[in-house]
Image (spheres, rainbow, N blue to C red):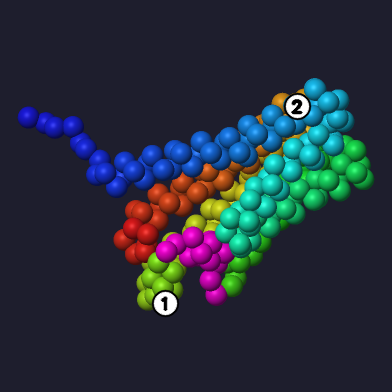
Amino acid sequence: MAHATEHPPAERQRATSSWRTIAWTLLLDVALPFGSYLVLLVWFGVPEAAALAAAGGVAFLRAVVIWVRERQIGALSILLVVRFFLGVLAALITGDARFVLAKDSVVTAVVGLSVLASLVLARPAIFYIRRSLSPRKHAFDRQWREAAGFRRLNRRMTWVWGLGLLGESTLRIAVIYLLPIGVAAFLSQAMAALAIVVLVAWTQWRGRRSPVDPEE
């Protein structure tokens, strides 16, 4: 008699944690900024460009909270702060709501190009990012020295991240300039968050499938 396949408790816990992370990401990076934009625009009559720049302050506040709680600033927090201040400058200088949205895509494209450029270095960007997030840092260093498959895996991940960020940036700019500004404001945030969620999920899945990965 066939029995239904049961997932180990660790697998179920990991899946639940992943879905919880996705839900929080969509809430904090999509729903909250877009809701702030609508409130400022509709209830307070703030101009579109200024409302979009101010809505970006949600990400800035997140970076501040992380710093207060952990007393450290990571690469992501720095990126959020830079994006916020660039949005404020774009709103003040141009007053163009679409340009305020597009500046995030430009930042994403620069990050994507930087990730690809790291492939010429001794160790690519994704290796350092994964290592910084892992409790097994020494295992990452050892595998890099000893396992050619692990080195190929991280370089392949770096290619996927770089090209993924560039692709998302290109599509987002098209959405920003082809659709009504209200729709573009929502979709641009959703696309950015979804791209990161998909890339992170793929990276975790690919790492777990590899026998040479320390996170396996």
Occupied quadrant, residue 9:
top left
- Up/down of 106 relative to 183, above or below: below
Q: Amino acid at mark 2?
A: Val
| Residue 44 x, y percent position in the rendering | 83, 26
Q: Is residue 143 magenta?
A: no
From the viewer's perspective, is 69 left or right of 127? right
Q: Magenta stretch: give its range.
A: 122-135
Q: Kindly check if marks 2 and 1 are in contact, taking CB atoms under 8 A apart as contact.
A: no
- The residue wearing badge 1 is 145
Q: Residues within 10 Å of mark 2 (few under 14, many from 20)?
A: some
2 vs 1, front mark: 2
| Residue 97 x, y percent position in the rendering | 83, 35
- Up/down of 67 relative to 11, above or below: below
Task: Label 1: state its secondary structure.
Answer: helix
Q: Is residue 134 magenta?
A: yes
Residue at point 67%, 52% (across, down) = 64
Q: In which quadrant is the C terminus drawn? A: bottom left
Residue at point 34%, 53% (across, down) = 209
Given residues 61 and 214, the one toward you in this image is 61
Q: Residue furthest right?
A: 93
Residue at point 74%, 37% (across, down) = 55
Q: In which quadrant is the N terminus drawn? A: top left
From the viewer's perspective, is 99 left or right of 191? right
Q: Amino acid at mark 1?
A: Arg
Task: Label 2: state its secondary structure.
Answer: helix
Q: Residue furthest front?
A: 68
Q: Residue furthest left?
A: 1
- The residue wearing badge 2 is 39
